[in-house]
Amino acid sequence: MAVTTTDAELVTALEQRATQLRIDSIRATTEAGSGHPTSCASAAEIVSTLFFSVMRYDPAEPANPRSDVFLLSKGHAAPILYAAWSQAGFIPPEELLNLRKITSDLDGHPTPRVPFVDVATGSLGQGLSVGLGMALNARLEKSDQRIYVVLGDGESAEGSVWEAAAVASYHKVNNLCATIDINRLGQSDPTMLQHDLDAYAVRWEAFGWQALKVDGHSIPELLEAYERAARTPNRPTVVLARTIKGKGIAFAEDRMGWHGRALKKGEETDTAIGALQSRLNDQPAVWAPVKPSAGRGRAPAGAVRPPAYSAGQSVATREAFGAALAALGEANPLVVALDADVKNSTFSEEFLKRFPERFFEGFIAEQNMVGATMGFAAKGKIPFASTFACFFTRAYDFIRMAAISNSNIKLVGTHAGVSIGEDGPSQMGLEDLAMACAEPNFTVLYPADAVSTWRAVEAAAAIHGPVYIRTGRPKIPVIYANDEKFETGKCKVLRQSGQDRVTLVAAGVTVFEALKAHERLAAEGIAVRVVDLYSVQPIDREALRQAARATGGRVMTVEDHYAHGGIGDAVLAALAEDRVEVHKLAVREIPRSGKPEELLDRFGISANAIVAKAKAVVERGS
């Protein structure tokens, strides 16, 4: 194909911008005294081509939800991202020199503190999953938006990348385009495949992707690859870009020992920048951004219909979650649901039946499901992802990054604790509260019955930020009226009197064990107060303090969770400044199969255990 004058001018302009991106990345990391200039240098032509020729976006409105998306999965190359937005006119050039300073929002790895970053990256292997969620969202909205994800070759060893690759191919998201910066060198060793682009291509094609091999420093080859990707139907594209780590920095090119190492001020930096500047011409590159098309307005959310349960009716909280999610979907078109092949157990299939176009099957790939959920949230949806509580633990790094991003995701863990019964310890989520509560941005709700579960789902949708809801497997009686109000950060006092001697704090299934214990203790003349800790994080510190004072500082917690990091520790932390004694009943060993009531009793969290411990606490305090 003949190259026109216009084509040649574009290529020259993009090459000039790539050179300037390298210069800016070196200057920023040298000034910071740390960073990854060689990882930036290998990606310069890729970033230049995408930002200044391929993508449609408005530099003055970086958070425009209709713009094409650039996701830097290899987040350690953040300086080149900031440099690109500087060249686009959004970041003043002098601000680049504040990289990594506590006074600047230009973190060492990208975070949403800056408006052009949708999610935090840098924990490798996550960007493609997030991009998949964004691509599915664009399809749902019938938008022509395209999603571009730049990965490092080293991170393609992460299993989550291949989870995303498989699910993206299944969903045929042709608006998703990944680019792998194959610069051969990892942090401490060469990568497994080094520059074997044929091997990369075979793997990606086996996953159903279109794989395009290019010289990652050739602007014409990159332009052609992205054009081809844009016109390919029914499957995503991966651009396999062979690059040189440290490209343009002669003494660091393709050499080990330069990962994460800034150039020293003085001779090193002056030599590298001087050589790069000699390649720049006197004509500034002219660029006119192609802005995104206008989007359609979104229908407003309506009121969620209330629950309609009967007192004493036996309903599993997981079942109530499914019904509530379907009701929420009726009221709010922004609600979407994601599943990991357990929808008939989590009851999220109730949403699927009503809104199949807003339900996305992620299969048994929980890391990718949480990443895709982050992608939906970044584009304005209210996504609920559900699976067994225990399986969220394998996606914990994604959950951690969602917290850093303050991502508006809603995670619902079902089948929590030993109360699931015969399936055994591998299926029993017993550490999920510790996992979620460890993240400061997470709201953690643990409803006890169908009504409180319904209200938890409704509350989660109204909270901006990540939420975790814990639900259970067994059917349990409804104890709350349908019009009962629940507030995040508040608890419910279910039983109290002026003679209470111990405060029992429970949540979920153990609320019913505490209520049974209350009746048995009352029959023996021992009054106890029962608290339903519906909101674990934030916690109702003042209500707990009042209850503790009213019962002589004697507090017991009982939970279907391991002893560390659950409601016992949450209550301890809330009462840390008070003169109280807190006794924790929790699962303290690896459980086994059995019937739910047998397991609750064996592992010390049944009504029997509560009664025995309460008597001992009262006797000791008499």
Image (tube, helix red, strand yellow):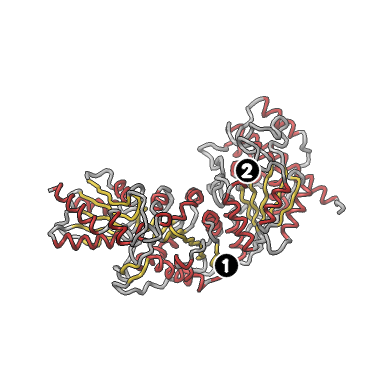
Residue 413 pos. (x, y %): 43, 59
| Kind of residue at disc 2 | Gly
Quarter location, residue 253: top right
Residue 397 pos. (x, y %): 50, 48
Instruction: Tell which of 233 and 70 is nearer to you.
Output: 233
- Name the residue rendered at 67%, 59% in the picture: 208
Give the crowd class for mark 2: few <14, some 14-19, many >=20 residues within 10 Å: many
Quadrant that contains the N terminus: bottom right
Residue 83 in sight in this render:
yes
Cα distance between the residues tagged 1 and 2? 41 Å
Dot in front, 1 or 2: 2
- Name the residue rendered at 33%, 60% in the picture: 508
Q: Which residue is mark 2?
A: 154
| Kind of residue at disc 1 | Gly
Residue 255 pos. (x, y %): 68, 32
Instruction: Tell me if residue 420 comes above or below residue 282 in the rendering.
Output: below
Q: Is residue 4 left or right of 288 when viewed as pictured?
A: right
Q: Which residue is mark 1?
A: 297
Q: Is residue 550 left or right of 231 when viewed as pictured?
A: left
Q: Is residue 568 left or right of 160 when viewed as pictured?
A: left
Q: How many marks?
A: 2
- Name the residue rendered at 32%, 61% in the picture: 509
Q: Under tag 2, what secondary structure?
A: helix
Q: Under tag 1, what secondary structure?
A: loop
Instruction: Tell which of 422 and 204 is nearer to you.
Output: 422
Residue 571 pos. (x, y %): 30, 50
Q: Is residue 386 left or right of 525 when viewed as pictured?
A: right
Residue 491 in sight in this render:
no
Give the crowd class for mark 1: few <14, some 14-19, many >=20 residues within 10 Å: few
Farthest-out residue, right: 2
Quarter location, residue 165: bottom right
